[in-house]
Image (tube, helix red, strand yellow):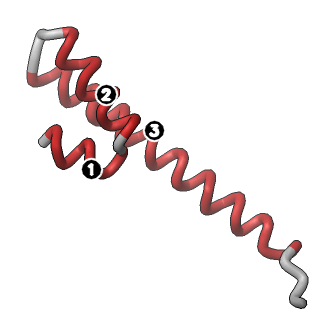
Amino acid sequence: MPNLSSLKPLLFIVIFYLLVFWLSLSYWAFRDARERSNSVVFHVFATGLSLVLPIFGLFIYM
């Protein structure tokens, strides 16, 4: 059985990158919704959709 302890830093980096990417997509959706509309409901909907369904939510939002 191979020693997988050397892969832990790589796994941490990948998970951290995906988390930052997910949060940046949500922030981008919030900023874009704020520029497109004055409706607070739309801002919450766009941000929530991108948080719950990261990639698919952005396609639905667009």
Q: Secondary structure at mark 1?
A: helix
Mark 1 — residue?
56
Q: Position of residue 1 (x, y in %)?
A: 89, 90
Q: Position of residue 10 (x, y in %)?
A: 71, 68
Judge from the rendering whether residue 35 lies leftward or rightward of residue 6; answer left or right.
Answer: left
Amino acid at circle 3: Leu
Q: In the rendered image of this protein, does residue 44 appear above or below residue 60?
A: above
Residue for point 28% across, 18% down = 44
Judge from the rendering whether residue 14 lies leftward or rightward of residue 42; answer left or right.
Answer: right
Indicate which disc residue 47 carries: 2
Residue for point 9% across, 24% down = 36
Circle 3 Cα neighbour tier, 10 Å, few/some/many (<14 / 14–19 / ≥20): some
Q: Residue 62 occupies which quadrant of the picture?
A: top left
Q: Can you tell which of label 3 and label 1 is closer to the viewer?
A: 1
Circle 2 Cα neighbour tier, 10 Å, few/some/many (<14 / 14–19 / ≥20): many
Q: Disc 1 and disc 2: Cα gap in Å?
A: 13 Å
Q: In the rendered image of this protein, does residue 1 appear above or below residue 43?
A: below
Mark 3 — residue?
23
Residue for point 78% across, 74% down = 7
Q: Disc 3 and disc 1: Cα gap in Å?
A: 14 Å
Residue farthest to the bottom, as pictured? 1
Amino acid at circle 2: Thr
